[in-house]
Image: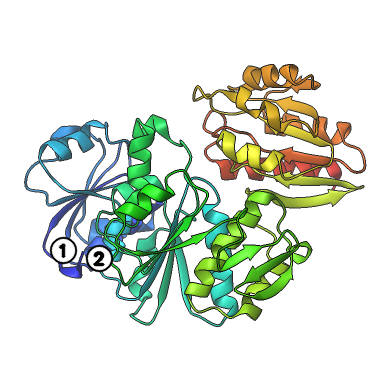
Amino acid sequence: MKIQDFNNKKVMVFGWARSGKAAAQRLLELGAQVTVVNGGEFEDDMVYRQLLAAGVQFINHDDAVSLNTSFDYLIKNPGINYETALVKQAKKLKIPILTEVAVALSSFEGRLIAVTGSNGKTTTTSLIRDMLKSDGQKVTTAGNIGIPVCEVIKDLTADDTLLLELSSFQLMGTPDIRPDIALITNIFANHLDYHGTRENYVAAKFQLTKNQTSNQLLVLNADGQDTDEFIKKTHAKVVAFSRIKNDYTVRTDNVDLIISDNHLMPLSGIKLVGPHNLENIVAAVTVAKLAGVHDTAIRHVLETFGGVEHRLQHVLTDNGVVFYNDSKATDIEATQTALNSFHQPTIWLAGGLDRGDDLMRLLPNLSHVKAVIAFGETQQKIVAVARAANKPVITVDDVEQAVPVAVKLAVTGDVVLLSPAAASWDQYKSFEERGERYVTELKKVLGL
C-alpha cells in the first residue's frame, strides 16, 4: 500500500482501544475522512477531544447499518471477530477490511523485519531488537508486542528499521505486507475459536510471506509441520533454523551455540532457561545475522537478556525457591514448554478461561511437578489432570489465593511456576493483569 491510499478516502475505524485511537490519528495525518465506531460510549479523554475537534465523527454503537458503500475502508481492532455484524456488512459490500498495521505500513519506506508464530513471538522479537540495538543499529519495535504501529510510524524514515511482532489477527488485516526479513517461529493449532479451522489459522500466518519477492528473506523453523508447504508456496529466499538439527548456519552441539564455524559461546552462559528459549534464541540469532549484526553484540545480549514479562519470567528467588511468571502461557503448548524447562520439583499454578481444550495432553509433562494449585473456569479440568498423574492438588478461586498456598508448600530447591494453560478473560482483563497480580501478591506474601 502507498501513502495516497488513504488520502481523501472515507474510512471507518471499528474499536476504540489503543490501536483504534492510533489508527484514527494516523488516518487524519494521511488525509482521510474518519469515522470511529465503538460498541459503547467513548471515554472523554484528550485523544477523543482532539479527534472530535479535527472533524472525526463518533458513533457509539456497532450496528451494521452505520456502514454503507460511501466508505472506502474498514479498519478494525484485530481482536474483533469477522462474524461481527459490522464486519460481515463490510464483506457484503466488498469494502476492504484492514487493521491499523496496514494503515501504518502504507507510508513506511525503511527496512521491515516481521515476526509471527504461535509461541515465542515476543521473546524472539525482543531478542532481535536487543541484538540490533547492541550492534548500534537504529530499530523501532511495535505491533503485537504492545505498541500500535501507527504510534511510531510517522517518525520513521527510509533509513530506519521497523521490527514488528504480528499476530494472526493482525496479519489477516494486513494484505499487502512485504517484509525484507520475515520470521515464522512455529505454528500450532491456536485461536481456532476465531479462525474456525487450523487451515485458516495457517493461512493467516502465511500472509506474512505471501507478497515477498526473491530479493527478500523468509526464516522458517525446519522442524515445523507446515515448513515444507511454505517453502513450496513462498517466493522469498528461505533460511531455515532448528533447535535439534545441526546442519544450519546457526546451530548448537548441545554444548555451544555455533554461528557458521564459530563457537560463539557455551550454552551454559545463556541467561534464558528452557529448551523452547533455545529455539527462540536460534531463530533470533538467524535473523540478527541476516540483518548484519556482529557476533559480539549477539553474545552480549544472550549473556544478559533475562526474558520478557509474563513469558517464563524469573520474578525472584527467596530462601532457595525460584518463582516464575508465565502468565502469557494461554495455551497447552506454551505450558508444556514451561513445565519441560525445569527438572527441579515444581509447584504448578494453572487455570483460566475454558475454551474446551483437552488438558489431559499435559499429563506427560508433570513428571517433575510435586503439587498443583488450580483456579478459574478450567479448575476442575486441572484437578482431573493432577489426579490422573497422582499429584496433590489444591483448589483456590484465583491467582491471588494461589500465591500464599504455593509459598507455604515450597521448600528450598523448588520452582513455583504460574503457567495457566488458558486465557485470562474469565477473571482478568489480560494475561498481563493476571501476571501482575501474581507478582504483586508474591512480593506481598514474602514481605518484599
> Can residue 5 be seen in this snapshot?
yes
* Residue 170, numbered label: none
Mark 1 Cα shell of 10 Å, populated few (<14), some (14-19), many (≥20)? some
Position of residue 284 relative to residue 230, above or below, is below
Whether the residues at callouts 1 and 2 have beta carbons within 8 Å, the answer is: yes
Work out whether residue 337 or residue 175 is closer to the camera in this orientation and state it: 337
Nearer to me, 219 or 355: 219
Residue 55: percent from left, percent from top: 19, 58
Question: At 48% across and 60% down in the image, what residue appears?
Answer: 240
In which quadrant of the rendered view does residue 134 lie?
bottom right
Numbered marks: total: 2
Amino acid tagged 1: Asp
State which tag comes first along the sequence, 1 or 2. 1
Q: How crowded is mark 2: few (under 14 residues within 10 Å), some or many (20 or more)?
A: some
The residue at 22%/37% (across/down) is 87
The part of the image, by quadrant, that contains residue 347 is top right
How far across and how far down the image is residue 220, in percent?
46, 56
Q: Is residue 213 left or right of residue 115?
A: left
Q: Is any atom of residue 43 visible in this view?
A: no
* Residue 133 vertical position relative to residue 315 in the rendered view, above or below: below
Provide the secondary structure element on which disc 1 rests: helix
Residue in the picture at 61% in, 60% down: 246
Given the image, on which type of amino acid does mark 2 rest?
Ser
Residue 106 marker: 2
Locate the N terminus by quadrant: bottom left
Q: Is residue 8 left or right of residue 372?
A: left
Location of mark 1 (residue): 5
